[in-house]
Image (spheres, helix red, strand yellow):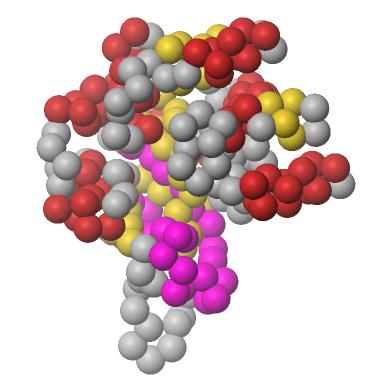
Amino acid sequence: MASTRFPGKPLIDLCGKPMVQWVYEKALISGAADRVIIATPDQEILDAANAFGAEAILTRNDHPTGTDRIAEVALKVESDVYINVQGDEPLIDPNTIRAVSAPFDESDVSMVSAFAPLPEAAEANPAIVKVVTDLQGNALYFSRHGIPFPRSSRSQPLKGHIGIYGYRRDVLLTYPNWNQTPLELAESLEQLRFMENGVRIRMVEVTPSGPGIDTPEQAAEVREMLLQ
């Protein structure tokens, strides 16, 4: 609720429902999990969740990242795998949530995230995170810079990171015990802390969803899209 760019944004009205309800319902529709929980430090969001019938857990308000908040929930709710769907993505495709959950059928997968092809015009935008992967589909690096650098011409589309994560319990519970890492601090990207500590992140390609909401202008855009 204390978002600096858009105070109160989790509960803004989007066509008759608070934004967090849209995200919660997309998670339910995905069928990817046995249980869907809203994790929040705000009593207002907890009350709103209860009002529309969602399960919610009140967390500490001093978590530096969303992953730290999910790790607190994992201490209270035991599961093999946790999928972190960010609460400002009301247009997220349920298929994306399913796609992130699927690789955990493999025993050697500890963490999963997603990407979608980007237009070249996005290369110079540091707000759009890019990822490069190895031949097995694991992330090699995430950056706000356009990677890989096209020495001659770009032979493949840029891969834009989609901010959804899946974690096995042991990896998630270890994360808050690690200090912030040099690359994480340089790029301001929490997923790099996992990579700098040796965790492989399996990447799955998905169809781009609609925009997330960080500003009132984006909220107006999403309202128009929901009405179509």
Measured as percent of width and height from the top left, residue 208 is found at 61, 53
Q: Hey, which quadrant is residue 142 in on the image?
A: bottom left
Image: 84 above or below 156:
above
> In the depicted view, which residue is nearer to us: 62 or 173?
62
Measured as percent of width and height from the top left, residue 214 is found at 55, 46
Measured as percent of width and height from the top left, residue 218 is found at 65, 51
From this viewpoint, is residue 26 visible?
no
Reply yes or no: does residue 112 show up in magenta. Answer: yes
Q: Is residue 111 left or right of residue 220?
A: left
> In the depicted view, which residue is nearer to us: 172 or 106?
172
Q: Is residue 192 left or right of residue 84?
A: left
Per the rendered image, the range of residues in magenta is 111-138
Q: Hey, which quadrant is residue 103 in on the image?
A: top left
Picture residue at 62% right of the left edge, 14% below the top = 48
Picture residue at 44% right of the left edge, 74% below the top = 124
Reply yes or no: does residue 179 show up in magenta. Answer: no
Q: In this view, does 29 lie to the left or right of 200?
A: right
Q: How many numbered circles does the render carry?
A: 0
Measured as percent of width and height from the top left, residue 189 is found at 31, 50
Picture residue at 54% right of the left edge, 36% below the top = 7
